[in-house]
Amino acid sequence: MAEQSNQSRRTFVKAAGAAAAVAAASKYVAAPAIHKARAQNNQVQYGFIGPGSRGQRLIERHLTKIDVGRCVAVCDVYEPNLDMAAKTFGNNPDKYKDYRELLARKDVEAVFITVPLYLHYPIMRDALLAGKHVFCEKSLVFTPAEYHGLKKIAEERRNQIVQVGLQRRYSQFYQLAEDMIRKGTIGEVTNIYGMWHRNSNWRRPLQDPSLEKQINWRMYREFSGGLTAELASHQIDIADRMMAAGPEFVSGVGGLDYYKDGRDIYDNIHLLFVYPGGKKFQYSSISTNAHLPYGGLKGMREFGEVIKGTEGTIEITLGKAMWFREPVVAKKVEEAGKAKENWVAGSTVTNVKPGDGFPLLLPNDEITENDSFLQRELKFARRWLYTKGVMVPEEEVDPEYAELESFLQCVRDKKPENVKANLEVGLLDSLGVMLSNKAMDEGRRVYYNEIDKMGLES
């Protein structure tokens, strides 16, 4: 029994080893600036453009609790949203219906943009030209022409920050998973699976039918990238990040098969991204069932990813993650006829049973030489409870909060290098969204290098 206990502890320690390097990475800072108007307490003064459902969530749950910045102006064409945002901020920010009036203020150093997707680029362009730093929700741009346009403007204004709302970039679990992959903990990543499944029609109720497209804009192609932009964009970014590369091409099928209510976006999508070396990311988003077939993350519904390597697997979602080791590992065969000698047995058979998993452990669960005997025992006990599903490791900071605070810290401290979800990340993610929809619409493989000739007609 003592030997088994020691083996379990050693296995836990090995599973936690990669957490050490992430401890330092869990501090969120970054920033530059053109306009430098600051309150006396060094708060960044910002404006908020488009406080609809998404914007109101960010304001109420996070921005009102972040003291790095102070909202001095809000803007929305829909008066109820405008009034609600001003009331939620509670510090009497000025209200505007024309965002250009907000951008003309010299005391506004940065802006948050949470408008419908088709308006991202024009407002972001005007904000950058007005000298503001920009936080914009994903997807960053809507069309190929906008992709090229934003790239050009940003190259001319390198001292301004552009951050995209991909909060998984600020999750400790995803940072830890990436660190494990870079260290080879799960071998060579060959396949990633992502899903975002809902049992919902996605429709928002209306008191005034004339506001249908204004309120339910996500359902119409003239305004929205559909499920690909609103949901898949998060997980396309995860795949690009974990593969440490952009895809070569994407193919897929989509359908408008269940909801016959006037929408023209797909209500289900199925995508396949192929990366260099034949590595693949398979993705699905459906609207008729929320179940996910992941075995290790108990109680997980709607969204998550499975990252498969030659020596292990990570199942992950916001707030939790599990690591599964492969009981037997076969070495890569480069030549026919050499498979037999390339099999490795014995030392590659771990003491982890097939199907067993370990939670990804965050820095506060890491065993250190400075721990007292009691602290070590409590950590071992907590880890054991994690494996039984009685407890789960928790993020020290909500990733949504972290991404917003990071943006404001970046602006304040002039550290653009600390922006994790930067312009390059946002453009690659937007490219994945646009080309995925094109692949489904045209029923073919769409290669990423096609963007070089798209949207340049004028």
Image (cartoon, helix red, strand yellow):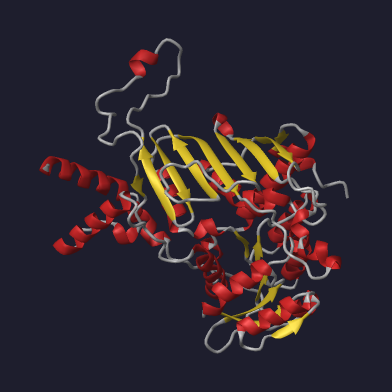
Q: Residue 257 appears at what percent x and percent y?
A: 74, 41
Q: Residue 267 appears at what percent x and percent y?
A: 71, 46
Between 168 and 108, the one lying in front of the other is 168
Q: Residue at x 76, y 52 (%)?
A: 148
**119 in relation to 257, above or below:** below
Q: Can you name the residue that lies furthest to the left here?
A: 2
Q: Residue at x 73, y 70 (%)?
A: 127
Write down the quadrant of residue 193 in the picture: top right
Between 389 and 425, the one lying in front of the other is 389
Q: Residue 120 appears at what percent x and percent y?
A: 74, 62
Write down the quadrant of residue 113 in the picture: bottom right
Can the viewer see residue 134? no
Q: Residue 87 appears at what percent x and percent y?
A: 65, 84
Between 406 and 224, the one lying in front of the other is 224
Q: Residue at x 12, y 42 (%)?
A: 1
Q: Can you name the residue that lies furthest to the top here?
A: 337
Q: Is residue 407 left or right of residue 51?
A: left
Q: Is residue 291 left or right of residue 18?
A: right
Between 206 and 222, the one lying in front of the other is 206
Q: Residue at x 53, y 65 (%)?
A: 400
Q: Is residue 35 left or right of residue 20?
A: right
